[in-house]
């Protein structure tokens, strides 16, 4: 069941949603997420395509029984954690202050 909100609370939400700060927050979010997602997907798809169509490259031994495919596959995990770490830092620096300010505005208006 959806939570019922008052018209005043809804109006305040709509006001904040239409504000320049909210649009700046969304733009800042997209500026990180869109290029990072595209870069990661290209990186991942290159791995999948190379695994399928370049078996000689992927089977090349690096050290002992460790081949390029294994190293590349493990780097997918490293990349994922790197992106999460970078996003946390980016968000804390660029997005959290804006979001905190918007949340404060909303809470002050709703408490009236």
Image (tube, helix red, strand yellow):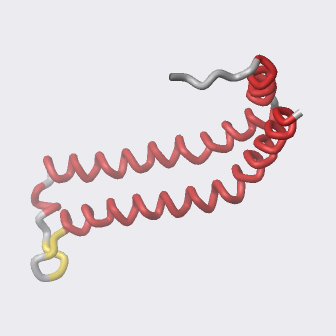
Up the image or down, 75 lies above or below 2; here it is below
Question: Toward which corner of the image does residue 108 lie, by quadrant?
Answer: top right
**How far across and how far down the image is residue 20, in percent?**
81, 32
Q: Residue furthest top?
A: 7
Please name whichever residue, 10 or 44, is drawn nearer the observer in this view of the structure: 10
Quick one: quadrant of the C terminus?
top right
Q: Residue furthest bottom?
A: 64
Please name whichever residue, 103 or 54, is drawn nearer the observer in this view of the structure: 103
User: What residue is rendered at 63% in x and 57% in y?
Assistant: 90
Please name whichever residue, 39 or 5, is drawn nearer the observer in this view of the structure: 5
User: What residue is rendered at 75% in x and 38% in y?
Assistant: 24
User: What residue is rendered at 43% in x and 63% in y?
Assistant: 81
**How far across and how far down the image is residue 4, in percent?**
64, 21
Left or right: residue 17 versus residue 34 is right
Left or right: residue 11 versus residue 82 is right
Left or right: residue 25 versus residue 3 is right
**How far across and how far down the image is residue 56, in percent?**
10, 60
């Amino acid at each position: 069941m959806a939570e019922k909100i008052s018209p005043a609370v809804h109006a305040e939400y709509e006001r904040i949603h239409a504000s320049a700060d909210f649009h700046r927050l969304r733009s800042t979010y997209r500026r990180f997420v869109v290029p990072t997602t595209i870069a990661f997907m290209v990186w991942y798809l290159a791995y999948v395509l190379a695994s399928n169509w370049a078996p000689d490259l992927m089977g090349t031994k690096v050290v002992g029984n460790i081949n390029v495919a294994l190293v590349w596959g493990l780097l997918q995990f490293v990349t994922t954690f790197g992106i999460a770490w970078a996003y946390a830092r980016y968000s804390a620096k660029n997005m959290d202050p804006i979001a905190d300010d918007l949340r404060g505005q909303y809470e002050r208006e709703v408490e009236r």
